[in-house]
Image: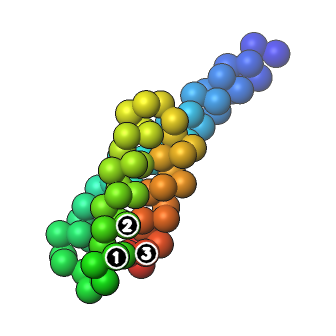
Amino acid sequence: MQKTLIAAALALAAGGAFAYHCPMDMKEIDAKLATNPKLSEADMAKVKQLRADGEAAHKAGNHDDSVKKLGEAKKILGI
């Protein structure tokens, strides 16, 4: 019983550590932007806004919204 509880606690802790990958997504977006991807001005502005909104949501603790916005930016960038 005790081993089961310890295993469950470790699984939950590990899951929480990997649940939000906002900083990794932001780094991927920044790296792609540094290569000057060929995007329309409108798409570039949208990517930059989504990136900023995603970071703001992350800092506010709204990780689900952050992941969504950063995912949209990555999609536009083809990541």
Question: Where 10 sits versus 33, above or below?
Answer: above
Type of amino acid at the residue the image marks with label 2: Lys
Q: Position of residue 62 (x, y in %)?
A: 51, 36
* Residue 46, numbered circle: 2
Whether pointer 3 and pointer 2 mark residues with C-beta atoms closer than 8 Å, the reply is yes
Which residue appears at 59% of the width and 37% of the height? Answer: 15
Q: Is residue 64 left or right of residue 38?
A: right
Q: Is residue 8 left or right of residue 47?
A: right
- Quarter residue 30 falls in: bottom left
Element marked by disc 1: helix
Q: Position of residue 50 (x, y in %)?
A: 40, 58
Type of amino acid at the residue the image marks with label 1: Ala
Question: Where 13 sits versus 75, above or below?
Answer: above
Whether pointer 1 and pointer 2 mark residues with C-beta atoms closer than 8 Å, the reply is yes
Which residue appears at 42% of the width and 65% of the height? Answer: 73
Disc 3: which residue: 76
